[in-house]
Image (cartoon, rainbow, N blue to C red):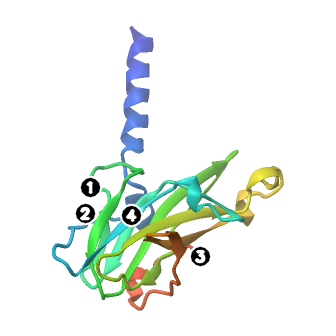
Amino acid sequence: MRKSVVMVVGVFLVSGCATKPLSEQVFRQKFPAAVAAAGENSALIKFSADSKYESARGVPLAGDPLLCGPDGMFRVNTEDTIATPSAQTVVKAGKEIAVTSAIRWVNGSWKKTCWPFVAFTPEAGSTYVVVNERIGGKGWSALWTGVKFQTCQVSVFKETATGIESIETRQPSSGRCRQSPN
């Protein structure tokens, strides 16, 4: 009887911690879910950890997508999950937005969380993919590149008829969208 009570309490504690979104853990506040824009003057923003967006130096990781704009900061996921592989939203085109995906990785007993915001101005009718990669510790270098020396990098890609192209991003102009550990 005693063993089953301890096991139930342990499972409850672990499951209670697992449902708290990473964005809430790092910013110590809850963010409302992003409301998709409507109309022709809009763009689709997707968040991905697909290996086809992998760079020579990094590895894409699934995270908790955030969107920041003139109306504030929003979570792209609507449920209380840390990562959703198919997170996406529609935004108004022609206005600067800042995007990131808060990611966390573990190497032994070391944990690192990273979420730099990057800004760009989406074009109407376009589709963009946001990718946050762990930089360092890829391939064989994982054996000697410790978490302390790893960082992350957010890239934005535009989907075109001929494939994907990397787009230039910049520092967000809004101070509230610059919150990052880097």
Residue marked by disc 4: 46
Q: Position of residue 120 (x, y in %)?
A: 43, 84
Looking at the image, tell me whether mark 1 or mark 2 is earlier in sequence order.
2
Residue at disc 3, secondary structure? loop
> How many neighbours does mark 2 have within 10 angstroms: few (below 14), some (14-19), or many (20 or more)?
some
The residue mark sitting in front, 4 or 3, is 4
Query: Of residues 98 and 48, which is closer to you in this image?
Result: 48
Residue marked by disc 2: 33
Looking at the image, tell me whether mark 4 or mark 2 is earlier in sequence order.
2
For badge 3, the amino acid type reads Asn
CB under 8 Å between callouts 1 and 2?
yes
Left or right: 148, with 12 as reference point: right
Q: Position of residue 62 (x, y in %)?
A: 49, 54
The residue mark sitting in front, 4 or 1, is 4
Query: Of residues 61 and 48, which is closer to you in this image?
Result: 48
For badge 2, the amino acid type reads Ala
Residues at marks 4 and 2, CA–CA distance in whole angstroms? 15 Å
Residue marked by disc 3: 182
Residue 178 in sight from this viewpoint: no
